[in-house]
Structures are given as structure tokens and as C-alpha cells.
Amino acid sequence: MKHLPGTFALVTILAGPAMAQSLPVAPGNWEMSATYEQTINGEGDGAQENVFTQCIPQDEAVIALGDIYGSDCTITTTSQTPTSIAYDLNCDMYGVLMTGTGTFETTNDAQAVTVSADISHLDEVNGELRMRMNASAEHIGECE
């Protein structure tokens, strides 16, 4: 199976400057979990999961969608509230344009975060290429 390299920047999921497409979070130590799955015509190698902790200082306590997806994706907000953003994605993944949707939400007084995205591309040779990402993070205390 051919794999398309992911552009989701999990390491920076909770870091970055404030932007229009961003939500505030509580500063401190966070435990993060993300699951990625890539398929071609519905077949894949299964989901890959990453779990880690990260300290978020007070001056970086904002999640910016641009930090999650990087410069290869154009993000268009379709709706926004003080605690959630729904958006459309157009991502250039090494010359392959993948499009889809995502959601991004903070809960529990900005102590928890969920992010999900589903993007795909219909290719005449390979069929449907699809990437799904589901991530969550919880504030677990002060930075050590």
C-alpha cells in the first residue's frame, strides 16, 4: 500500500501564537493522544496512535489551527463559537490535493481539547486516498 506522509503536526498541537482560527487553553502540563489512519479504497494498515505529554507555558496557551496542519493546508472556518471551530481543509500533500472537514473544541473550562479531521482525494490510478485524524488532550497539572 502506498502511504502519503501526514502533515499533521501533533507535536505543536498545543503551541503557537494567537490567531483568528485559535482557541485558548489552560497553561500547564498536558497529556495528548492522537490517532491517524490512512486508507486507499478503504484498505489500510490500521490506525497509528501517539501519546505524549507537553508543558504549555502561559504565553503559549492557545491552540492555532495553522500550527496543527502547517503551511501546506488552507483552512476555512465554516462556524465558530467561543469554544469550538468547524472548518474545511484543502491540503497539498506532496502534489496531491486532499480536501475535507475538521472540528476543534475545548471543554471543561479549556482543560480538555478534541480535534478531528477527515480529508480525501479521488485518484484515477489509486482510487480514493483518505486520511483521518482524531486527537484529544487533557490538562494534567502544573509544568514540572
Image: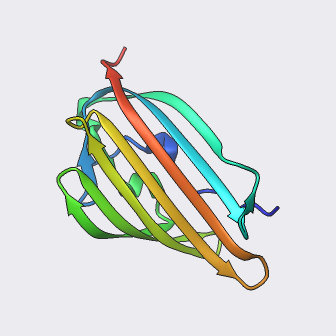
The answer to whether residue 125 is above or below residue 28 is below
On the rendered image, what quadrant is the N terminus found in?
bottom right
Identify which residue is drawn at 36% across, 67% down.
87
Q: Closest to the observer: 48 or 18? A: 48
Position of 94 with respect to 66 (left or right) is right
User: On the image, which quarter does residue 141 sit in?
Assistant: top left
Q: Closest to the observer: 66 or 111? A: 111
Identify which residue is drawn at 55% across, 32% down.
51
User: On the image, which quarter does residue 126 sit in?
Assistant: bottom right
The answer to whether residue 51 is above or below residue 1 is above
Q: How is the image coloured?
A: rainbow
Q: Position of residue 11 (x, y in %)?
A: 50, 40
Q: Closest to the observer: 36 or 93? A: 36
Q: Does residue 90 appear in the picture of this structure?
A: no
Identify which residue is drawn at 43% across, 40% down.
136
On the rendered image, what quadrant is the C terminus found in?
top left
Outermost residue, top side: 144
The answer to whether residue 16 is above or below residue 40 is above
Position of 65 with respect to 79 (left or right) is right
Position of 78 with respect to 116 (left or right) is left
User: On the image, which quarter does residue 112 sit in?
Assistant: top left
Q: Position of residue 42 (x, y in %)?
A: 71, 65
Position of 131 with respect to 30 (left or right) is right
Identify which residue is drawn at 53% across, 53% down.
133
Outermost residue, bottom side: 124
Outermost residue, right side: 1
Q: Position of residue 41 (x, y in %)?
A: 73, 70
Q: Does residue 94 appear in the picture of this structure?
A: yes
Q: Position of residue 25 (x, y in %)?
A: 26, 38
